[in-house]
């Protein structure tokens, strides 16, 4: 069943055996939920090339899932190519601190401990300010 594949792939990412993975099921949702149960897995579901690019460039997903009910084979290949050819921050060099801001978010999510958050009365400790400003996008 799909969830077993998701768990196995997620475990491989967790153990550092692979940096990224592509997963497929009917909607992409179930298999991405299964993979996300494993530590250090940041999975996303996409149905377009722009979504795949943003998933990696802005969110650093290391598992990308697609649904066969919604993504045609040729589109799936384009999505996979786009995802595998980009990295965190790719294409946003013109955006001041884009990489740093998103890397900080990924690191904070990775370090998040739900039990500590719960023990703290569901209050986020101040994590610091981060300057964001847009530079003019190059023509």
Image (cartoon, rainbow, N blue to C red):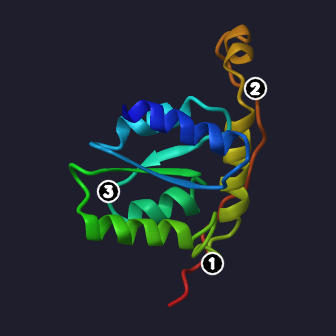
Q: Classify 8 as above or below 50.
A: above
Q: Which mark is residue 125?
A: 2
Which residue sits at x=23%, y=62%? 72
Q: Earlier in the sequence, mark 3 or mark 2?
A: 3
- Asked if residue 72 lies left or right of residue 76, the reply is left
Q: Earlier in the sequence, mark 3 or mark 1?
A: 3
- Asked if residue 104 lies left or right of residue 64, the reply is right
The Cα atoms of the two marked residues, 3 and 1, are separated by 26 Å
What secondary structure is found at the residue carrying circle 3? Answer: loop
- Asked if residue 103 lies left or right of residue 71, the reply is right
Q: Classify 132 as above or below 118.
A: below
Q: Quadrant of the N terminus?
A: top left
> How many other residues sit within 10 Å of disc 3, few (<14), some (14-19) or many (≥20)?
some
Residue, disc 1: 94
Q: Which mark is residue 47?
A: 3
In the figure, residue 95 lies in which quadrant? bottom right
In the figure, residue 133 lies in which quadrant? bottom right
Which residue sits at x=46%, y=31%? 4
The answer to whether the residues at label 3 and label 2 have Cβ atoms under 8 Å apart is: no
């Amino acid at each position: 069943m799909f969830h077993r594949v998701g768990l196995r792939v997620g475990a491989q990412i967790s153990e550092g055996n692979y940096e990224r993975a592509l997963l497929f099921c009917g909607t992409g949702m179930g298999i991405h939920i299964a993979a996300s149960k494993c530590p250090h897995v940041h999975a996303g579901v996409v149905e377009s090339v722009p979504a795949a690019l943003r998933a990696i460039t802005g969110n650093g997903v290391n598992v990308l899932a697609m649904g066969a009910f919604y993504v045609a084979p040729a589109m799936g290949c384009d999505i996979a190519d786009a995802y595998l050819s980009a990295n965190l921050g790719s294409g946003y060099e013109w955006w001041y601190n884009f990489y740093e801001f998103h890397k900080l978010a990924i690191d904070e999510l990775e370090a998040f401990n739900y039990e500590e958050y719960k023990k703290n009365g569901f209050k986020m400790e101040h994590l610091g300010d981060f300057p964001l400003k847009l530079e003019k996008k190059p023509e």
